[in-house]
Amino acid sequence: MILKSNFFNIAVFIVVIGFMVMPLTGCHEDVEILPPLSGSILITHRNINSDLADKFHPIVGETLEATYTGPVPQANIKFQWRKEGSKENLYPDQADMFLAGPFEFTPTIIGNYTVYATSKGYSSIKKNVHVINDPREPTEEQYDFSNFLQDINNITAVTITPKAFILGNATLDGKPISGDSLDGSMRVYYQKKDAPSKVEDLPTETGIYDVTFDVIPNDDFFTPANELSAGQLVIYEKKPEQTFSNLADLKTFITTSTSSDTPNIYYITLENINTLGGDRWKNGSIGNILNEIPANVYIYLDLSNTSITTIENDAFYNLDNIVGIKLNNSVSSIGDAAFYSCSTLISSITIPSLVTSIGENVFGFCPLTSVTFDGKIPANKLPSSFGEEIGDLKTKYLAGGIGTYRRTKLQEGYSPWEKQ
């Protein structure tokens, strides 16, 4: 009985396998593999002459035309317009249309897109399209003004660089726009404080100037741009370096020697001192001394030859005359709001390797664009925030550790911090 049962089970197993195999071998149709569609897709700017079309990416709001060129008649071609990486056709009403003429589409936001052309019996071909904002109609968010602080003996042209209109903060054609570049279509103006009018020539006298710019239209497509504010240009006279070994001598110098009707910058080195003297409001502290600096005088402060270990709370609070500071390597802690609202301060600063704690709001409202961390600071010794307008610096530092982090100053706000 056992032997018969085993023969029966084997027979059933063979029959089941047979039924499983039969559909695979006899009932499934082969998948049709379509030959590739030969030819290419040409994207043209409907409203721009050919010279400009070669120079610029397609622009938001501009009507573009896609034309197929190849052995298949245009009338047998269908087009689709998709955001890159998406399968959604942005023109679904035209998905099944054969067009006798070009396929027209109007991108409404910047980004990367793909145009597909298909024909019955062929696989599709595609054309990638990168859409930007109009660089000839600038907005304050699109441009970055640099070189705002210049020595009277070494004046160079200001630079106004497009930022937001090309993804990734690239410049137009890989070149920054400055002065009268972009085919002579950018005008930059300078107006000295209290002066009755603005001029187009780069100033050659010390002073503080408001800088504005606009863009000249050179064809019917581009309309005149409103004049935009770039910021202030400070042209200063560099003064001889000064070295002090005590804060009392620094105070004497500040109160008797620095008055000026035109902008001056002093490079001040402190040496052989071990304290900054407390917060900015404490009599005799370095912050209290620097608060006495008259208008038009700016300080670059070098602490590298001191033995200071602590930058006290509020040490440089709300000082608007420090354009740079170099910390000494023995600093181990930086207090709350130490550099808070230093509105001219330091586009860059280096945090020494021995620093193990940083206080709250340390750089609030400082125009920093570069911060270098030479050491690893424990997460629980970092502030909850480096300060207002400092953005995501803490998050980036926790993720990236030791190194230099930079961001770009835009007309309104800043780009995110990125490790270099």
Image (cartoon, rainbow, N blue to C red):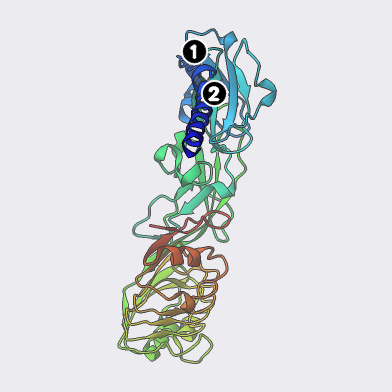
Name the secondary structure under disc 1: strand
Q: Is residue 351 above or below residue 15?
A: below
Instruction: Give how far across and how far down residue 22 sits, in percent.
Output: 52, 21
Residue 42 as seen in the image, left or right of residue 266: right
**Foreground tag (2 vs 1):** 2
Q: Nearer the viewer, residue 64 or 111?
A: 111
Say which residue label 2 marks: 116
Disc 1 marks which amino acid? Thr
The label shown at residue 4 is none
Amino acid at the residue labelled 2: Tyr
Residue underneath mark 1? 69
For image coordinates 47% across by 79% down, the residue present is 381
The Cα–Cα distance between marks 2 and 1, rounded to whole angstroms, is 13 Å
Residue at the spot 65% in from the left edge and 18% down from the top edge? 96
Does residue 81 appear to the left or right of 53 in the view shown? Answer: right
Image coordinates for residue 233, horizontal then vertical, percent: 48, 58
Percent across and percent down for residue 36 are 46, 17
- Judge whether 220 appears above or below 68 on screen: below
Of residue 38 and residue 25, the one placed in the foreground of this image is 25
Earlier sequence position, callout 2 versus callout 1: 1
The foreground one among 257 and 134 is 134
